Structures are given as structure tokens and as C-alpha cells.
Image (spheres, helix red, strand yellow):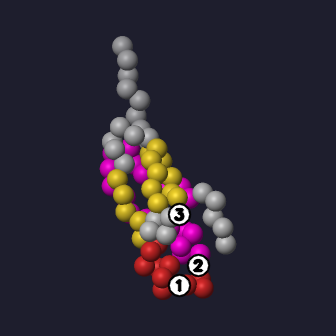
Amino acid sequence: MSIARQHIWVGPETTTFATSCEACLARRDLWSVAMRSAHVEGTLRREADVGFTTCRRGHRIVVHRVGRRLAVVG
């Protein structure tokens, strides 16, 4: 199975996250190895809206921030 892009979504104030790599979990032929390498943890600066990380096996994961409030000018 090939997973071209993986995306996770974090809240407006979130700076740390933990998730599982879908590409690793899809590797049923190496299930025990995939389970150990599938866990991903990372950070996203508060001022950033998008970030990138990789799992231990090199699969790329895009991190998106949602629900950010825009500053009112005036």
C-alpha cells in the first residue's frame, strides 16, 4: 500500500502532538516492526500554520493548524 500524503490537524493553541504513521501501520507483512516505528511525536510553533515531520521509517507527515483566530485591525 502506498500512502502519498499523510496529514494531521491540530488545534489553534496546540504546540505538541502525537500520532501514528498510516504508512507504517499499513505494512502488515512486518507488523511488529511497523507498530514500533509508527508512533510519531512532534512540535509546531504557536505562530506556524503548517509544519512537516517524518516517522522513524522516513514517511512524511504534514501538520496543519486549524481554528486560528485572525487578529482584528482597527
For numbered disc 1, what is the local secondary structure?
helix
Which badge, 2 or 3, is on the more N-terminal residue? 2
For numbered disc 3, what is the local secondary structure?
loop
Task: Name which residue lies at 37% across and 26% down.
Answer: 71
- For residue 14, the mark is none
Horizontally, is 23 left or right of 49 in the view?
A: right
Tell me how many marks there are. 3
Task: Name which residue lies at 38% across and 22% down.
Answer: 72
Quarter of the picture holding the N terminus: bottom right
Task: Name which residue lies at 43% across and 79% down.
Answer: 36
**Who is closer to the viewer here, 14 or 36?**
36
As shown in the figure, which amino acid type bears the numbered disc 2? Answer: Arg
Can residue 56 be seen here? The reply is yes
Horizontally, is 55 left or right of 2 in the view?
A: left
Counting from the top left corner in percent of width and height, residue 9 is at 47, 52
Residue 25 lies, with reference to residue 65, above or below; the image says below
| Res 56 → quadrant | bottom left
Identify residue for label 3: 59
As shown in the figure, which amino acid type bears the numbered disc 1? Answer: Trp
User: Marks 3 and 1, how far apart in space?
Assistant: 16 Å
User: Marks 2 and 3, how far apart in space?
Assistant: 12 Å
Q: Nearer the viewer, mark 3 or mark 1?
A: 3
Q: Which residues are magenta?
A: 6-26
Few, some or many residues within 10 Å of mark 3 (<14, 14–19, 20+):
some
Q: Is residue 20 magenta?
A: yes
- For residue 31, the mark is 1
Identify residue for label 2: 27
